[in-house]
Image: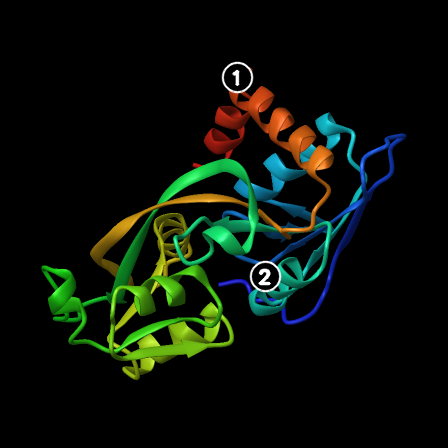
Amino acid sequence: MKKILLSAIALVCFMGHSNAAEITLTTEDYKPYNFMEGDKIVGIGADQVFELMKRAGVPYKAEMMQWSRAIGLAEKDPNTCVFTASHSAERDKRFTWVEPLFVDRTILIRKAGSSVAPKTVDEAKTFRIGTQAKDYTEDLLKTAGFPTIDPANNLEQTLKKLEAGRVDLVAVSGSFYENLKKTGAAVEEAFVINETTLSMACNLNTDPATLEKMRAALKSMIDDGTQAAILAKYQ
């Protein structure tokens, strides 16, 4: 699996003639949503975000970093948005949203060949669950009352814990799991927790007029089939 980036490795700028406020975009390396291809940030989420910013005529800069920093900056700094973020109940009032970019499942995965096979949420709660710190999956597990959550700085560390038997299951998105399988990772789907809407999560002090331009641009992409074409590209 491609190494999760711990610091900024890419800066993408769009400078247009616009009265809209400049937006700072933060993201992480989380294939297939956002990842590096050469010197460009691409993916299901990234391709949509950059296209909608272009259509909206909104100047921006984009930076890839560790997830906890990416979402932390979006919550702290005005005119900052993080992608691709799950719109969870816990996050709902902490951000203002541009959505939907994608609807995905949240699942628990196990090491291939493991006998861990929860049939219900209550059964899943009896196991030690690995997750990425500050990820929506950590919030979801806490809200659902999972008693033994083992967060790590990134998913690479979490998957190493799964391989070593230090956790029984790992919470990830369905798309992330499918990408893992393509790389030959020895993991299996064990349990589906829920479905989640993936979005741009923007600071509450983001310029309202700029946000409306961004939302209108995303709607136009949905209406004209651009979103569907981007999703199909990464299937």
Name the one closer to the observer, 235 or 33: 33
Residue 233 shows up from this direction: yes
Residue that carries the numbered disc 1 in the rendered image: 223
- 90 and 166: which is toward the camera: 90
Residue 207, image x and y in percent? 73, 42
- Image quadrant holding the C terminus, namely top left
- Residue at x 39%, y 53% (from the top left corner): 89
Check disc 1 and report its element: helix, strand or loop: helix
Residue 3 visible, this angle:
no
Q: In this view, does 40 lie to the left or right of 47?
A: right
Q: What is the x, y in percent for residue 109?
A: 27, 62
Q: For the residue marked with disc 1, what is the amino acid?
A: Asp
In this view of the protein, which residue sits in the foreground, 20 or 200? 20
Q: How is the image coloured?
A: rainbow
Asked if 42 appears above or below 56 in the picture, the reply is below
- The answer for how far apart the CA atoms under marks 1 and 2 are is 29 Å
Mark 2 sits on what residue? 71
Q: Picture quarter containing residue 48?
A: top right
State whether residue 51 is above or below residue 39.
Answer: above
How crowded pointer 2 is (Cα within 10 Å; few <14, some 14-19, many 20+) is rated as many
**Image height check: is 95 above or below 232?**
below
Question: Does residue 104 sit above or below 55 in this rendering?
Answer: below
Q: Is mark 2 on a helix, strand or loop?
A: helix
The answer to whether 107 appears left or right of 23 in the picture is: left
Q: What residue type is labelled 2?
A: Ile
For the view shown, which residue lies furthest in the top direction?
Answer: 224
Instruction: State the residue lying farthest toward the right.
Output: 17
Q: Where residue 171 sits: x, y (%)?
A: 33, 63
Badge 1 density bin: few <14, some 14–19, many ≥20, Cα 10 Å: few
Say which residue appears at 72% left-offset and 28% top-offset.
Answer: 56
